[in-house]
Image: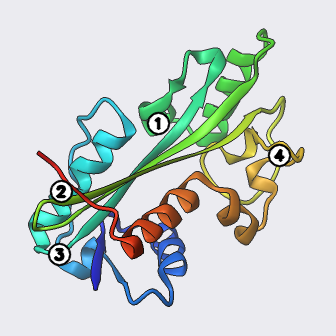
Amino acid sequence: MKLVLASNNAGKLREIREIMAGSGIEVLSQREAGCDFSAEETGTTFTENARIKALAAMRATGLPAAADDSGLEVNAMDGGPGIYSSRFCGERSYAEACRDIIGRVAGHSDRGARYCCAVVCCFPDGREIRCFATTEGEISRELRGSGGFGYDPMFLLPDGRTMAELTEDEKNAVSHRGRAFRELLRKLKDGEYYVNQ
């Protein structure tokens, strides 16, 4: 089976191909599938945005397509930046955005946060699979680590390390995206679909 990943992000493509290895599912980037565009994310939830991207790639290629939408929810910011995580960074570097969040959390006793990832897979016959996963942690008091990307240097895991201090394999094992795509693979194998009305 060929599955289009509604992304051209090389790191994401590599991670998803590793998860799907040996399953008989060939994962193609949008570019490899012949549709090099970005769907506008107009949803109000991670799942809605993932579905918009998956539907657009499926309709453009005629192949099953999967997409994810992910972000950071911070308790002290009422769940923000949430679906606006990449836009929250804006023109700033992620290091600057991280320092901004650390500053906003500084006066709060609740430093809790979570990475969220929704994955939606759409099929030409109308079937869909939806998955959602989180990685729980808290906001650190300083930036630590040189791995990962985005908000990883301030995302503190229960073991005391930030996401940016993990090896790539360690991160893939605990990441919200890795968990959501492993759930997608399980549902594909088990035939856990539903027809969207």
Secondary element at image label 1: loop
- Residue 140 image position (x, y, % from top left): 81, 33
In the rendered image, the quadrant that contains the C terminus is top left
Q: Residue tagged by mark 3?
A: 63
Identify the mark nearer the N-term, 2 or 3: 2
Q: In what element is the residue under mark 3?
A: loop
Tell me the CA gap for discs 3 and 4. Answer: 41 Å
N-term-proximal mark, 1 vs 3: 3
Query: Given the image, on which type of amino acid does mark 3 rest?
Result: Leu
Query: x and y percent of residue 27 in the render?
Result: 36, 80
Amino acid carrying mark 4 in the image: Arg
Q: Residues within 10 Å of mark 2 (few under 14, many from 20)?
A: many
Q: Which residue is mark 2?
A: 55
Of the numbered discs 1 and 4, the one sitting upstream in the chain is 1
State the CA–CA distance, disc 4 to disc 2. Answer: 38 Å
Mark closest to the chain's N terminus, 1 or 2: 2
Q: How many marks overall?
A: 4
Name the amino acid, label 2.
Leu
Determine which residue is flagged by label 1: 91
Q: Which residue is mark 4?
A: 144
The image quarter in which residue 113 lies: top right
Q: Residue at x 16, y 66 (%)?
A: 58
Q: Give the percent coordinates (x, y) of residue 29.
A: 32, 75
Task: Between label 3 and label 4, give the one nearer the viewer.
Answer: 3
